[in-house]
Amino acid sequence: MSGRFRASRPRGRHLAAHALVAAWLLLAVVAAAVQHDLPVARWLAVHLLLLGAATTAIVVWSEHFAVALLHARPPGGRGSAVRLAGVNIAAAGILTGVWADRPLLTGAACVLLVTAIGAHLVTLVALGRGALGGRLAPVVGFYRAAAPALTAGAVLGLLLVDGAAGPQWYTGLRLAHVHVTLLGWIALPVLGTLFMLWPTVLGVRMPEHTTRAARRVLALTGSGLLVAVAALVAGLRPAAVAGVAVYGAGVAVAVALFARTVRARPPVSSAAAWMLAAALGWLCAAVAADLVLLAVRPLDEVRDDVAALTPVLLVGFVAQVLVGALTYLLPVVLATGPAERGTLRARLESGRLWRPVLLNSGVAVWALPLPAPLRLAGAIAVAAAGIAFLAVLVPVLVHAGRAEHRARDTEHRERAAARRPVLWGTAAGTALVLLGVLAANSGGGPGPQDTAAGDGPAGTAVTRTVAVTLEDMNVSPARIEVAAGTALRLEVTNTDSRRHDLKVDGGPATPMLGTGQSHTLDVGRISEDRTAYCTLPGHRAAGMTLDIDVGERTGAEHGDETTVEADAHDGHIAGSAGGLDLSAGFSADWRPRTADLAPAPGGTVHRAELRAGRTRVEVAPGVTQEMWTFGGSAPGPTLRGRVGDVFDITLVNDDIMGHGIDFHAGSLAPDRAMRTLEPGERLRYRFRAERAGAWLYHCSTAPMLQHMANGMYGAVVVDPPGLARVDHEYVLVSSELYLGTPGSAAQVAKLRRHEPDAWVFNGIAGQYTERPLRVRAGDRARFWVIAAGPGDTVAFHIVGTVFDTVYKEGVRLLKPGDPGGAQVLDLAPAQGGYVETVFPEAGHYSFLDHDMRHAEAGALGTIEVSE
């Protein structure tokens, strides 16, 4: 059977559709050319190419090929035109809505896109009913499977844009969106079409087993993609790896079949053949790289690394397949005879040697981790190749358009009438995109100065736009004064390395903004003083506020009033005015934090996973509050090893705000290891314990005062060489306790005034008075003590004993056999050590912080010594 494709060609409709594809490509090239100056243009360039050009081409050609492959009657031209117009208007609406920050427009456009693609799917299914079918009829299954993929991609994209799912789902949603869009909506129809198009371009017969191979490829790629996308949304990395591996196996089956089709004779279109082959190579490379990244790196890091694969997939695969297919198909569709087909093909293949070389070398340089000037040169090469193709494409479309207008017979006039809705859709879609670009830029870019508009007649509202920057736990400017009645717009940009948002009290809020992301807030008319702030716990109290003041009233007065009211209210709730009642009983289900310290485990590598999150803890008798924790407890789990051992720690951020970790026991550059993890991210922290001691670990995210005071700290014990065995070992982490809502203004005010509600050992006031530690008379006990602070020292003492061993900050100050003794182990914040003693007789021995203010407020316990 010949691989050449023949089908009826509704020339006018295809001409209009491909004019639209050219318009989308042109806009994408323009956006790509300016992306180094305007970060959001990168997003726009990607979606102009995918949502605009590629989607339009897929909708047109999948329907066209389905008719030919199924030997079915073509659907009505008007219905096809309406579906195509709907897709393009929806794409333009989504781009405009996201660019101009119009959530309602974005949501409505997504609904329109899903509706149009649903109608497209219904059409593809209906074409198979009663159709004669053909050898390659199974290829239509690729087109049908791609439609739900775009629907899923649109829903996931909408969740990402409006932040409705919450920041903890951001990583999984973004990865799922990228995979289902690129590997589903784009790659599936391309792979299916190549079963027919590839031998057609080569001018050879299809292999006999093409149909079986097509079914096998669809089963593998479809099932693999479904598993991968579901796993990415759920954050299940192993399942995602398995899904991508199955998908890759399907691609490999297809590529193997295509390779066996190549013959040693000139193809019908050499330019199309080279570009389609190169595109398949980039697809294989991208899927392989994606599989490796998912297999060896956490999802939050893969999310960032996907950016490096963007030029490979978008330009090397998507754009190159689009250009290669158009190079071959346009002469087939637009020409009225062999002579005109040859003329059009010659025009489209001009530069067939240097254009693919320029495009693919540019993609390679752009994607590799090379210096910025070289990568910019690669991007310029890609843009040059794209402009060169448009330079030959546009005259071909113009020539075909003129020929169409010269047609006089009834059939051509009917076709011309059928394409008018498409042309109107084309014009509307392109106009919406251009209007969106103009609207997004008409408000003025962010800068150090304010911009104002509307100095009109009396009674006309003045609109004022202010650029606001979020950085280093500050909002800049921190105060804005506006006249009453002013319509205020805030252009908010996050330049910090951590995610932030900005909410106007009683008004609108931005989504969570990553580094470099921006959002516009329409606050509306200002008639009274307002406050805007970051909603992440503790960030408002740390100073991330913006006062919006009316008239001459000062922001300081307004802020002071708010702070005093909040302090009084939160303080009353916390019950700090009357102090803690340590004589009260703990709740029935309360359990103390064990102080027992197990010996250092065997082996030289110690692995642990710490999950940052929130846990409600009974921090004193009858007093429960939320704590920020590592591993579900405050303090976090105690880690132990020996000098020379390696600690391999995985930190997972399960919280709604950023956290990091700092191990004092390790020595390494803090840039990456101690960076802040956004919600859902994970980090592998690996260090070698070169020095012995009792070490502190704590959250490394600012403001550290709040993160540590709310429970994010723990101990690492590294045994000194030759450490003798004792009968009992305990670890006691000393810290302050601040009651109240973590991160609230009232709690932060207490932190800054240094007014703890209690001092505690191992996070709970008075717990070892309720549940004493137990030893026998004559037993030797070792007490490891670490001062977590965050601001106070500790003077550890056991009533009725004398310490005969003191080890502090890596130095043995006293050892058994020395004539002297010690009564206190004194530690500044972040210091650690241990003491040893032998209990002479049965009885009850109190241990405490010998700063009696601390002891009386919770830093005490009992050791029960039996015979």
Image (tube, rainbow, N blue to C red):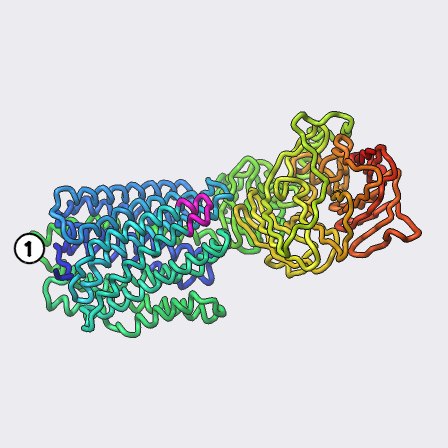
Residue 795 visible in this rendered orientation of the protein? yes
Q: Secondary structure at mark 1?
A: loop
| Residue plotted at (59% across, 58% down) | 672
Where 602 sits versus 269, above or below?
above
Q: Quarter-wise, where is residue 742 in the image?
A: top right
Front-most of 770 and 601?
601
Q: Quarter-wise, where is residue 359 in the image?
A: bottom left
Q: Is residue 232 magenta?
A: yes
Q: Quarter-wise, where is residue 286 in the image?
A: bottom left
Tag 1: residue type? Asp
Residue 402 visible in this rendered orientation of the protein? no
Magenta stretch: give its range. 230-241
**Residue 476's x, y, as percent?**
60, 50
- Which residue is label 1 attached to? 409
**Residue 806's x, y, as percent?**
84, 50
Residue sitting at the far right: 819
Whether residue 747 sits left or right of residue 386 in the image: it is right
| Residue plotted at (48% across, 46% down) | 170
Circle 1 residues within 10 Å: few <14, some 14–19, many ≥20: few
Where 160 sits versus 774, above or below?
below
Front-most of 741 and 635?
635
Looking at the rendered image, the quarter that the N terminus falls into is: bottom left
Looking at the rendered image, the quarter that the C terminus falls into is: top right
